[in-house]
Amino acid sequence: MESRIVDEEVVKYIRTLLPEHRGLLEELEAYAERFHVPIIHPEISQYISVMMKCWKPNSVLEVGTAIGYSASVFATSMKLGEIDTIELNEAMAEKAAETFETLKQLVPEVNVTLHRGDAKEVLPKLTKTYDLIFLDASKGHYMEFFDVAYNLLSPGGVLLSDNVLYKGMVATDEYANRRNKTIVKRMRWYLETISNHPMLDTTIMPMGDGFAISLKKGVIDEEN
Ligand SMILES: C[S@@+](CC[C@H](N)C(=O)[O-])C[C@H]1O[C@@H](n2cnc3c(N)ncnc32)[C@H](O)[C@@H]1O
């Protein structure tokens, strides 16, 4: 299904300007294309790489590892720190484990821990707090991860949520079909939650499949 979020010609043009990846990221992009593994869009990958220089997180938590592509983008951008990443699918986790072996050679000072299992069960067992949390698992379940993820996010930390506009269907019922109605309804509930949360400043970007950035405040902001 075609995306209704960004004009195809504009996306094509932007992609001509992105830096070409070499080595591990290039290999993972080829693997994802060959085996139809959904990974972050190239412009989201570049956005994350650039913004990591501003956010400078020391600790990252990712929900939805797949083959370890986005975790590798985080790791190569941060150079030093810790990444916890959660993957439910055993075959994906196997490939991600291979990815992280290679990644260790490239960025030895980033410690990546792969948690195999359902994020609903893994998240409540995590005890650290994180400077950045990336939600990129099944779209219909973000609300189930939200409360725990919010509590694991450090004050001043960044919550990133991918696929929040789901090919534009979240914006208007016109685009959604019956099969996708539940996901769309749940995603709207999620976006309303992060947009109206008193401790989050959120912006929703019509980029890729829709990308939300939420900054956790240090204290409740009475005026806004
Ligand atoms: C869009 S892919 C992640 C892509 C990855 N972040 C990247 O860009 O390289 C979503 C992944 O989330 C995993 N997933 C779905 N539900 C999950 C859950 N409840 N707990 C952990 N992983 C889950 C899927 O198996 C799939 O591999």
Image (cartoon, helix red, strand yellow):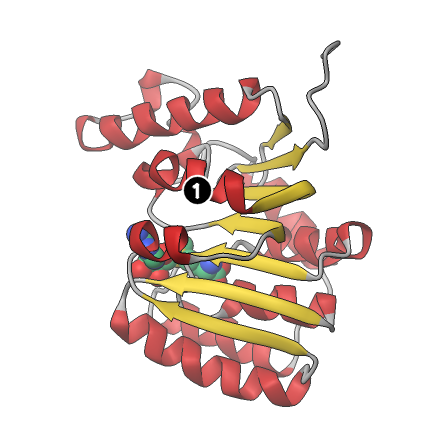
The answer to whether residue 20 is visible is no
Q: Is residue 127 above or below residue 206?
A: below
Quadrant of the image occupied by residue 196: top right
Q: Quadrant of the N terminus?
A: top left
The residue beneath circle 1 is 148
Answer with left or right where residue 141 lies relative to residue 132: left
**Quadrant containing ligand 1:** bottom left
Q: Furthest-right residue in view?
A: 54
Residue nearer the viewer, 217 or 75: 217
Answer with left or right where residue 96 lies relative to residue 176: right
Residue at horizontal 60 percent and vertical 19 percent from the top: 198
Q: Quadrant of the C terminus?
A: top right
Residue at horizontal 63 percent and vertical 90 percent from the top: 105
Answer with left or right where residue 220 lies relative to residue 70: right
Q: Furthest-top residue in view?
A: 223
Q: Furthest-front residue in view?
A: 127
Q: Is residue 33 above or below residue 42?
A: below
What amino acid type should be assigned to the residue bearing mark 1? Val
Residue at horizontal 32 percent and vertical 28 percent from the top: 186
User: Where is residue 83 drawn, in percent x and y?
Assistant: 57, 66
User: Where is residue 84 drawn, in percent x and y?
Assistant: 51, 65
The answer to whether residue 120 is visible is yes
Quadrant of the image occupied by residue 141: top left
User: Where is residue 182 drawn, in percent x and y?
Assistant: 24, 28
Residue at horizontal 62 percent and vertical 51 percent from the top: 132
Answer with left or right where residue 176 lies relative to residue 25: left
User: Where is residue 205 drawn, in percent x and y?
Assistant: 61, 33
